[in-house]
Amino acid sequence: MSKVMIREAVMEDVPALEALFKASYGELLKTDYPGPLLERALPMLSKVNLGLIERGQFFVALSMDGDLAGAGGWSYEPPGHGETVPGRAHIRHVAVSPKHTGRGVGRHIIDHCRDHAGDIHILECFATLSAVRFYEKLGFEVLREFDVALGGEIPFSSVHMLKDFRAN
């Protein structure tokens, strides 16, 4: 497991985060999504959620040599539209640099988000098909598969997952 330092993301991080998302999603999703679909979806997947940064709910993970190893955040409200539910938080936009995968970076980000979210007992996420195995290793369960309409028109398969900490 590699050591990383996690800090709150700031607006100055946005260009580096967009580059991270493009590199991560472009490489790590290609085994589960057809090339033409991924090519169309990548510009939308690579957009940074500025609201999460403004609210202090998005973080960067830096390797010991200063590389941007990963990033991710959380919110009380689900992605898109939906109501908040007391005791629940949603993991948002987690990405790990392809050169840092398999080293615990993603786990550190998820743990940090949970700690930062405070008094929650359920974490949810809308995972890519490629991330399901990662979330399952962390104790998340698959609820359902569904399509997200990226940009209102591109059907992109996602998986709704949940971890209830009261069960542990």
Image: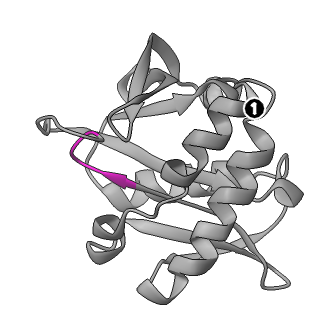
Q: Main secondary structure of the magenta part?
A: loop
* Colour option used: one colour
Q: Position of residue 58 (x, y in %)?
A: 43, 66
According to the picture, the residue beneath numbered tag 1 turns out to be 35
Q: Residue at x 82, y 80 (%)?
A: 64
Give residue 166's quadrant in the image.
Answer: top left
Q: Quadrant of the N terminus?
A: bottom right
Q: Nearer the viewer, residue 124 or 119?
A: 124
- Residue at 63% x, 58% y: name it: 21
Q: Nearer the viewer, residue 72 or 88?
A: 72
Q: How far across and down, in percent of the image, does residue 60 sit?
A: 58, 71
Give how far across and how far down residue 62 sits, in percent: 70, 76
Specify whether residue 77 is painted magenta.
Answer: yes
Nearer to me, 112 or 38? 38
Q: For residue 130, what is the image quadrant? A: top right
Type of residue at label 1? Gly
Q: Is residue 17 magenta?
A: no
Q: Residue furthest top?
A: 144
Q: Secondary structure at mark 1?
A: helix
The residue at the point 11 percent across, 36 percent down is 83
Assess disc 1: are there few (<14), some (14-19) or many (≥20) residues with their C-alpha within 10 Å of its C-alpha. Answer: few
Is residue 73 visible to the viewer in this orientation of the structure? yes
Determine if residue 1 is in view.
no
Lateral position of residue 71 relative to residue 19, left or right:
left
How far from the left and from the top, in percent, is residue 123? 38, 36
Q: Which residues are magenta?
A: 74-78
